[in-house]
Image (tube, rainbow, N blue to C red):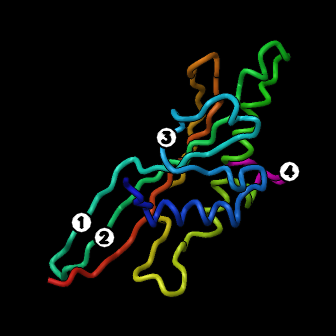
Amino acid sequence: MNNYKDAILERVKEVLNTHGSTELKGRYGIGDPGVVNKSQLSKPMAFISYEEQSLDMDASHEMESTLPVVIDIVCDMTRDFGQGLDAKSHQRVISLACGRNDDFSIREDSVSGVFMHHQDLTKTGDPMQLFVDPATPIQVELDYQTRDKGLVTAEAIVHLTLKTNQLINL
């Protein structure tokens, strides 16, 4: 049985549980939201995964890892059916992904706000630095998905890029 836990994705989850919205606290999973079912969506959930990984080693034997991460926030949209013009699930995922205060600033507890305010994810004792790439924007994509057994989900997909640098001993 595979008990592997990706340390970087686990750190992203830890940072979100510590600094993110109380509505999503303890509701972050690792992987794809394709595994969610309707009974799990009494409250929104979020799923953390990689888009890809790029490993680049230079002549000084330093390897830079570029790690595009996706955080997919999922909410049951079927509750909105027949409820009028405003899709509450759509507003909910926007609020959780990149919600704004009355002064138009990004809320610190939204997923985007967490990584804008906590760009260095390194903890004391970590063997290398882990940080949000300041050269790559945080992007939010809104979508909906028709899933199994009559489930339709509103989704906000947050894209951000993390980086690490590691000295390789040859």
Q: Secondary structure at mark 1?
A: strand
Local secondary structure at mark 3: loop
Q: Closer to the N terminus: mark 1 or mark 3?
A: 3
Q: Main secondary structure of the magenta part?
A: loop
| Disc ID at residue 137 | none
Give the quarter of the image for residue 128: bottom left
Left or right relative to 48: residue 99: right
Residue type at mark 4?
Asp
How far is the residue under mark 1 from the one under mark 2? 5 Å
**Tag of residue 56:** 1
The CA span between labels 2 and 4 is 39 Å
Q: Amino acid at mark 2?
A: Glu
- Marks 1 and 3 sit apart, C-alpha to C-alpha, by 26 Å
Other residues around mark 4 within 10 Å, as few (<14) / some (14–19) / many (≥20): few
Q: Which residues are magenta?
A: 98-105
Question: Badges 1 and 3: C-beta atoms under 8 Å apart?
Answer: no
* Residue picked out by circle 2: 64
Which one is in front in this view, the residue at disc 1 or the one at disc 4?
1
